[in-house]
Amino acid sequence: MFVSLDKFGRFGRFCLALGLGCLVLMGRPAAAAALDIQADLIDNSGVAIGTVQVEQGHQGVLINLKAQDLPPGYHGMHFHAVGDCSDLAAFKSAGGHVNPFDQPHGFRNPAGPHEGNLPNLVVTADGTVEVELYSDLVALDAGAAKLLDDDGTALIIHTDKDDHYSQPIGGSGGRIACAVIR
C-alpha cells in the first residue's frame, strides 16, 4: 500500500517517523461523523433544479447549495418552519420562517435577526449558483431552532432580494424554490 504524505506536510512526515499507525490521526476530524442532510431543490413545477446539503458544524450549520434555472440576481433565502414543499404554486405549506423566539426579521434589524434568516443568494446571468455559507443561528438536531424537528424544515428561495430589515420577510416576495430538510 502506498500512502502519499505530501498533502499532510510536516505532520505527515512526523507520523511516518512514528509509524503508519498514526495516520488515523490525519483522517477527517471528529466532526466527520456529524449529521449531514442532502435534499433536492425544486422549482414551482416540482422539477429538481439543484441540491442543498446541510451539515452540522461545531456551533451551527454549513450549507452548500448548487442550482440552475433560477432568475439572475439577488434572492432572499430563509429556513422555513415546516419541511413541506407540496404546495408547488407558492410553497406556502412550508409555513413562516424558523423563529422559535419570536424575533424580528433581518440582519440589519437591531432587534433581529431571527433563526430563519440567511444571506441573499446571488444567481449568475446564466441562472446558476453555487454557494457555501454558515449559519450559527440554527442546528440540525439540537436546541429550540433545530432544523430536524418533528415536521422538518424547508430552505426556501424567494423572487426578490431580502433587505434584511422589513417585516416579516425583508421584502423578498414570492417563493420560487424549495428543499425539504429532514
Image: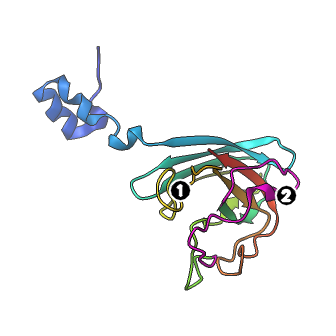
Circle 2 SS class: loop
Q: Quadrant of the N terminus?
A: top left
Determine which residue is flagged by label 2: 90
Can you tell which quarter of the image residue 30 is in?
A: top left
Q: Residues within 10 Å of mark 2 (few under 14, many from 20)?
A: some
Query: Is 115 situated left or right of 121 in this image?
Result: left
Real-space CA distance between mark 1 and mark 2, rounded to the nearest whole angstrom:
24 Å
Query: Which residue of the protein is positioned furthest toward the top in this rendering?
Result: 1
- In this rendered view, identify the residue nearer to me: 122 or 147: 147
The magenta span reads 80-105
Task: Tell me residue 4's x, y (percent).
Answer: 29, 26
Find residue 155 and name its label: none
Question: Which amino acid, mark 1?
Answer: Lys
Determine which residue is flagged by label 1: 146
Vertical order, 132 against 167 (above or below):
above
Q: Residue at x 52, y 60 (%)?
A: 138
Q: Which residue is drawn at 40% across and 38% down?
A: 33
